[in-house]
Structures are given as C-alpha cells and as structure tokens.
Image: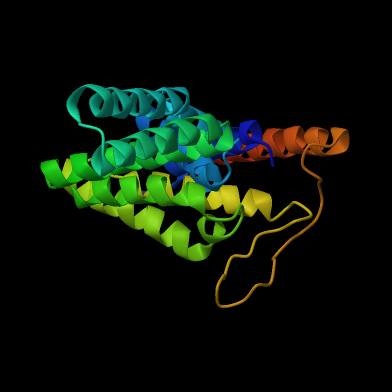
Amino acid sequence: MRGSAHLAIGLITGVAVASLVKGIPFSPAGIALAGFSALAPDLDHPESKLSHRLGFTHGYVRWAFGAAALGLAAYAYFQLKPGPDQRLSYTAALAFGLLGVALQGGSARKLALLFTGLATVLAGLYAQFLWLSLLGTFIALAPFTAHRSWTHTIWATALWTYIGYLADHSLGWRGIAQYAGAGYASHLLADTLTKSGVRWLLPLTDFSFKIPVLSTGSKTGNVLEAAICLGYGLLVLGLAIGRIGF
C-alpha cells in the first residue's frame, strides 16, 4: 500500500484504540502516534514518506562530506610537511569527497537516518530512557534492511509495542503501547492485502502471507485502497457510536 493509505489506516486505528479499548483515554496525541507507527515499518524503504521526513538532513550529509574533504585537504596543505602523513591526509580528503559525490538520493537518506537514529540513541542514554535508545536503534538500522523483510514481521511489531510499553512507564502516559502497537500492526495487516504479501514469521519461514486483493500503485489498487480506508473508517465510527450509545 501507499504511504498515504497506511497513514489513514493508522490514524483510524488510533481512533479505534481510543474509542473501543477499555481503560485507554481518548488522546489526539495517541491517535497521531498510531499514524506515525503505521508508517514506521516502511523505514526500510528509502523513498517512504517517513524516511523522507526523518531523513530531511540527507542533503546536508553530502555537504558534510564535502566540507570534511576540504578541511582535510587544507589541513594537509597548511599544517603538514610533504611526506607520508600529508599524502595520507590528501587520500582521506579524496575519499571523503568521492563519498559525498556518491551519496545520491537513497544512499544519502539512509545515512541521514543512521545519523538521526544514533543521535536519538545518545539522547536516550543521556536521559536514561531505554525506550528512546531502542527507538533510535530501530531508526538507524531499519533503512539498511531489505524492503518488507525484518521490519515487516511479528517480532518487529512486538519490539515496537515494547518500546511503547517502556515509554508508557517512563512518561506516565497511559496507552502508548496500545496506540503504537496497533498502529504498527495495521501496516502489516494492510500490506497482507497486496499481491506481495508479508512474511510475518521471518526468519522462521520465508512464506508470504497474503490476501492479494490489490496491486500497489495501479489505478484499480488506488481505488481499492481508498475504499478500504473509507470502509474501515465507517466501521470504526459505527462501533464507536454504538459504544457511546448515540
């Protein structure tokens, strides 16, 4: 499914959790968290919506490598005498420059996500929030996995829910685990409706679970995605109204 459909389904799932799960307070922030969580599995795809948002610095990564190359070259020229050390510095400067040129599009975004994740890990260590460090680890590693592999498994869903559970206890915000876990699971369930399916139990089995009713990106698939979102939204709305007693 497209990112917009996953986001819509995640937000609707957040409304479902807020309205139908006993003991969970209705929270706009929780609904937004469910929407965010519904996009998280596609961090393994460099062109996903969430990768673009979290990897907003990818353009600056290339400039950083270029600046490092110029800095090393200047240091070698002005501070080092001709000899092995200077030649090594020039070689390192050239390597950094070539890396900056090579980091186009997806590769730059992966590196930006790596830096974003590592910064989050460090912030978690400084604040002594294990959940924040685990979140950063997920963000850092996910882009380097194959699409619809490790992030699209029941184990990743459990990990994401556990991160929410730890955040719940650290922040005292009831319902984080439910919002996060349900939003994440909604992504996998939605992708199960595509022709590619989802390998929920990887690496125990490479079997792809699927109910192939739509093809992502096709005109028919787009219409079906909209219909699924609309139908799901109406179902949740009906259940919520029924529970309230209107």
Tell whether 163 sits left or right of 183.
left
- At which x and y percent is residue 179? 41, 44
For image coordinates 54% across by 62% down, the residue present is 153
Residue 62 occupies which quadrant of the picture? top left
Residue 139 occupies which quadrant of the picture? top left
For image coordinates 39% across by 28% down, the residue present is 28
Residue 210 seen anywhere in this rendered image of the structure: yes
- Give above or below for 139 relative to 3: below
Q: The N terminus is located in which quarter? A: top right
- At which x and y percent is residue 73? 32, 26
Tell whether 5 sits left or right of 176.
right
Q: Residue furthest front?
A: 82
- At which x and y percent is residue 232? 65, 40
For image coordinates 20% across by 31% down, the residue present is 80
Q: Nearer the viewer, residue 57 or 208?
A: 57
Q: Residue furthest right?
A: 220
Q: Residue furthest bottom?
A: 204
Residue 244 seen anywhere in this rendered image of the structure: no
Q: How is the image coloured?
A: rainbow
Q: Nearer the viewer, residue 35 or 12?
A: 35
For image coordinates 20% across by 39% down, the residue present is 123
- At which x and y percent is residue 146? 59, 55
